[in-house]
Every structure is written in C-alpha cells, then in structure tokens.
Image (spheres, rainbow, N blue to C red):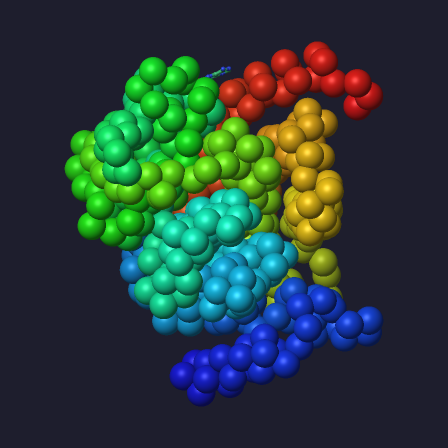
Amino acid sequence: MFLRVLPLLRARLIRLRTDSPKTCQPGDLTLVLPSHSPLVELARTVGAGTAANFADQVDADARFPHEAVTQLRAHRLLSCYVPQSLGGHGASLNELAFMCEELGKHCSATAMVFAMHQIQVACLVHHCHDDRHLKAYLAQLTQNQHLIGSVTSEVGVGGDMRSSVCAVDVNGDEFTLNKNSTTSSYGAQADDLLVTARTSPTAPSSDQSLVLLAKGQFTMEQTGNWNPMGMRGTGSAPFKLTGKGLTSQIMSTPFATISARTMVPVSHLLWAATWVGNAVASMTRVKSFIKQQARSNPGSLPPTALRMAELAPSIQLLRTSYRYLLTEYESINADPTRYDELSTIGYAVRMNNLKLSGSQLIVDIANKALQICGVAGYKNDSKFAMGRILRDAHAAALMVGNDRILNSNANMLMILKGD
Ligand SMILES: Cc1cc2nc3c(=O)[nH]c(=O)nc-3n(C[C@H](O)[C@H](O)[C@H](O)COP(=O)(O)OP(=O)(O)OC[C@H]3O[C@@H](n4cnc5c(N)ncnc54)[C@H](O)[C@@H]3O)c2cc1C
C-alpha cells in the first residue's frame, strides 16, 4: 500500500509545482490549505510509516532516526524550502510547519531534526541575496540532500545565541574556525554546518557572523555523551569543531539580522509546530483509551471524557497561537518594505512569548494526557504509553532556556511602548 501511494504523491507534487502558480487561487482548497499540500502528504506518509515504526527504538537506543531521515531525503524533502528557481520545491513556511506537525505526531526526534535542518535552510534562503556561492550551495542541496546542523551554543556562553567566544580567523580568502559546542544536534550525522562565530578574533562577543561549513571542511570530535531524559534521537552531544573554508562561506548579512529576521522566528514557529504534533499524539492516545473504557460500559460516557474535553482547548490554543504568528510572519516576509518590523522589540517579545507559552503548554498537555490514561499511560509497554511524549516535551523549555528568554523579555518590556 505504502509503496503504491508514494509514486502517486510524488507525481501529484511535480504536477502542482510545475502547473500551478505559487499563489493560491480563490476557492482552490487544495492549495489554500497546506494540510492538503503534496509535500505535507509526503511528510504524513513518512511520519505515520517509518518514523512511527522506529520511534520507540530510536528513543530506547538514544540513536539518530536514520530510517525516517533516509525517507525524507529520498523524497527530496530536505531541500523543499529551496526556491523553485534553484531547483527546490519552493515550499511555504506554512507547509514546513504542517510537515513538522505530521512528523511530530509520531516521532519528536524526527520532527525536531527536520525542523532544525529547515531553520538552517531558511537562514540561507532568506539571506543569500545575490551571493552566487550561497545560491550554488542551495542548488546543490536539491541534488545532494545534505543535512545541515546548527552550532550556536558554546562552552563559555551556554545557550546565549547572540554571543560567541570562537572567532573566524581570516587569512587571504580563507578562514579557520574552532568551536567547543555544548550541544550540537545530530553533530555526528550532519553533512554541513551553520556556525555562529565572532567576525574576527578582536571583535566583541556579540559581533557575530553565520558561517557555512561544507562536508569535508570540518571535523566534529564528540567530547561527551547524549543520554538525556527525552529527545534521545536528536544526538545533541557536545562537540569540538575544527573547520576551515573560503571567506565566501561567511554570510555577508550580520548574524544579528539573520537571528532577528529568520533564525529566532522560524525556530519558534517550527518548534511550536512539532509540539502541536506531540500534543495531537497525546490526544490520540487519550481518545483511544476513553473509547476502550466506553466499550466496556456501553451507553454511558466515561468520567475521563470530561478531562479529554478539557485537554482539547489547550491543543487548540497551541495550534492557533503559532499559526496566527506564522501567517503574520509569512506576510511580512513576503514584503521587503516590512522587513524592519521583524527587528522591532514588540515583534521579538511576541515571538519569545510563543516559545514560552508553547513550551509550557506541551508539558501541561502531555502531563494531563498521562493523568487521563492513568497506569495505562504510565506503563512504557502499553499502547497508551505517555512516557516518551512527556519526556520529549520537557526539552521544549530547555531549547534556549526559558529563563534566558524571560530575562530578555523583561528587559524589552521595560522599554516597549504599549503591550
Ligand atoms: C533537544 C535539544 C537540542 C539542541 N540542539 C542544539 C543544536 O543543534 N545546536 C546548538 O547550538 N544548541 C542546541 N541545543 C542547545 C540549546 O539551544 C541551548 O543552548 C541549551 O539547551 C542551553 O543549555 P543549558 O540549559 O545548559 O545552558 P544555559 O543556557 O547556560 O542555561 C543554564 C541555566 O541558567 C539559566 N540562565 C542562563 N542565563 C540566564 C539569564 N540571562 N537569565 C536568566 N536565567 C538564565 C537558564 O535558564 C538555565 O536555567 C539543543 C538543546 C536541546 C535540549
């Protein structure tokens, strides 16, 4: 069945991408609703198939979700956000978010790896401008389906993405770079890297560049283990990075701009989308648990059904809050005259609020789902097991510590006019 459906989906994807204008036509629900996009259908198939089949094993062994990522590669989904002019699918951010949701319903690690990779692609797509090297890199990505890792965290600055200790050391048209990262997801599997570093050895810690290192230009020596409570498949160990490349690989847009305009908003949006997927997974287990209870006592509503009804608004809140901000982001991003809005204090506070509220809601939802399923949810070998979802959910508050974000918001709110 699976093998029969995939060629059809792929054919439909090619037809839609080549025949249809990028903009939606009024009344054309196939294009208006990203949930009906062929790209999202492919992610749904990978999620419900391979990602779901290996999710428990990935978690138990704390290993990279090779099988699901291989499938994403096979469908050329690692380059789906690359514009069509460079050979990609030209996906919208909306589609990426729905794809994260679909994967997140089955395997948080796969969804987060996909999200983190797409955040890097978005930084390159939004800020490559007319740089022919970066454009050539993106065109190659559509062929080689490389997985891009992110190295922002660093020994000495922890999770403060806007500070670096390491620096690019330029000599002629080449540079070298050494960085001790505290946490680099899929550092052992990443083909290429985007790394934050000071613009020179004498630059202040906040004067940063984003640097592309391609396969063969760097080594990653793992300096510690990754045996965490949750998100065990992301392989986010500490690594010692040594790299060198051409100065054309240092992005010309300052990292401060890339961070405000793309890395932070796209991260918070796509992370929230994966959390919605996790929340839906909790709800699915809750519903089937309650239906099982109902079958054992036909004609009466199990008392736990009320708790299920209580859970639904939280999932709706998580979903609508990120989708509202996503629509706003897409409309600003489509209009260069509005780019400055993304660098305002008000916008930064709103995007941080999404991370703060979303990371709390997902833990709350998974926790309530566990209470509803009771011991059936507490047992790891039960079909209602909530352990993996709950453990994964706790990473949300740590992926850039919430207190760090609250501290930034506290400072910004002191000078923000209005709410
Ligand atoms: C699953 C997962 C995947 C990740 N993947 C990557 C990756 O691919 N690449 C990457 O670079 N990083 C990655 N990270 C790291 C992440 O982005 C953060 O850098 C890291 O989680 C922060 O680590 P920390 O909590 O030890 O450190 P810190 O950020 O140093 O925080 C330690 C504690 O101090 C608090 N704190 C620190 N500063 C302040 C402040 N100014 N005000 C108030 N409280 C403060 C924090 O809230 C926290 O409680 C990943 C993390 C996780 C959980």
In this picture, residue 246 sits left or right of residue 107: left
Name the residue rendered at 72%, 61% in the picture: 300
Residue 387 in the image: x percent, y percent?
43, 45
The N terminus, quarter of image: bottom left
Q: Nearer the viewer, residue 275 or 129?
A: 129
Name the residue rendered at 69%, 45% in the picture: 336
Question: Where in the image, quadrant-wise, is ligand 1 located?
Answer: top left
Residue 77 in the image: x percent, y percent?
45, 65
Q: Nearer the viewer, residue 79 or 31?
A: 79
Name the residue rendered at 63%, 14% in the picture: 411
**Placement of 138 over or under 49, stated as above or below:** above
**Placement of 397 over or under 278, stated as above or below:** above
The C terminus, quarter of image: top right
Residue 186 in the image: x percent, y percent?
31, 46
In this picture, residue 143 sits left or right of residue 26: left
**Placement of 160 over or under 5, stated as above or below:** above
In this picture, residue 195 sits left or right of residue 287: left
Can residue 308 be seen in the rendering of this structure? Answer: yes
Name the residue rendered at 68%, 73% in the picture: 21
**Placement of 41 over or under 124, stated as above or below:** below
Residue 35 in the image: x percent, y percent?
64, 66
Q: Nearer the viewer, residue 276 or 339?
A: 339
